[in-house]
Amino acid sequence: MPEDVPLIGDLHVYKGGIFVLGGAPGVGKSFALSQLAISGATGTAWFGLPVHRRFKTMILQAENGMVRLASEYQVHCETAGLDEWVRVSSDVDTFAFENPDFCAEFRAEIEAFGPDVIVLDPWNRAARDNMEKDFRAAFEAILSCMAEGDKRPALMIVAHTRKPRMGEKVNGRGLLNLLSGSLVLGSIPRAAFVLQAASDDTERKEFVFCCCKNNNGELGKATAWKREGVNFVGPLVNFDWDAFNNGSTGGGKNAKIEEHHLEEIFDHGRVWLPKAAAAKALQALTGAGHSAIYGALDTSAKGRFCHRLQVNPANGQLGIAEGLEVLEE
């Protein structure tokens, strides 16, 4: 194999291959792909996967306007010489690969810049229907814009995952089945990655990155990360994997946390606490992980202790009721 072909990990990403990154809307897929471009420019690891050499990335995207891109890359552009390694398009209305003029312009940009990786964000702007023939036609049209043979760059497509079914918890290889659309989306790419929120709690910024398919190498372990601004920082050492793998995305069950622990931190219904303060107190009391703690403080219908928790309408703080009768009143 030529030395310049492997780009990331154990052939997780390599020149000439097709790859997919999936995730729910709003999970941060665009940030993750921007971070891939920065990893290529600097040679730093991408979600813990080693980068074998510096590489150029071209991102064709239809998700983010110039204001969003400016605020995001203002942070990234502190890296010297980034312009030599990264190209990002403005948000186009659609990926019109059926239009010869669009393809000609795209092909010219590729030839001028010479990227090692091309990112298409999102896939549904290229394939508008979920029929297999539409997916295959979209792949063929995209590849027709690229060079042949060993000069062909890697193609990374960004796809949505479907909403999990009630009570469904999927991990590892099973995540491949969550990619929305035709089965072609999981079969053609050589490697597939899925980015998941560790919790449904909007105040938490922890995410799980998993390779669920790698035809040419090892999958590797799933890793947990914290999003700080436009960057994913980690991997997290003290992440509660038991709660994440066995529970819901809300945090799941954890035998360490019981009702009497809630009664103690809320002084049997006598005090209200901000969620962050309640989480800190619960962690100090039980030693449970973040996922289990925020799962225990989940006030939605799927929360373990939703029948006891109350939200103060005046300030959003949490408290508990001494019994169902209090809640009903």
Image (spheres, rainbow, N blue to C red):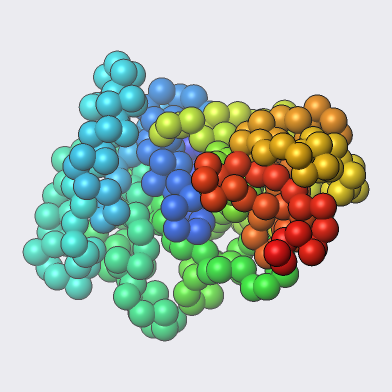
Residue 22 x, y percent position in the rendering: 50, 57
Q: Quadrant of the C terminus?
A: bottom right
Q: Residue furthest left?
A: 101
Residue 320 x, y percent position in the rendering: 75, 48
Q: Residue at x 76, y 39 (%)?
A: 270
Q: Residue at x 20, y 73 (%)?
A: 98
Q: Is residue 328 left or right of residue 92?
A: right
Check the image and report above or below for 130 versus 163.
Answer: below
Check the image and report above or below for 297 versus 307.
Answer: above
Q: Nearer the viewer, residue 307 or 16?
A: 307
Q: Residue at x 70, y 45 (%)?
A: 319
Does the image show residue 65? yes
Q: Is residue 40 left or right of residue 143?
A: right
Check the image and report above or below for 182 versus 50.
Answer: below
Q: Residue at x 61, y 64 (%)?
A: 176
Residue 16 x, y percent position in the rendering: 42, 51
Image-quadrant location for residue 278: top right
Residue 38 x, y percent position in the rendering: 39, 30
Q: Nearer the viewer, residue 225 or 148?
A: 225
Q: Is residue 5 left or right of residue 9?
A: left
Q: Nearer the viewer, residue 191 or 287?
A: 287
Q: Is residue 192 left or right of residue 108?
A: right
Q: Nearer the viewer, residue 291 or 195?
A: 291
Check the image and report above or below for 163 versus 237.
Answer: below
Image-quadrant location for residue 135: bottom left
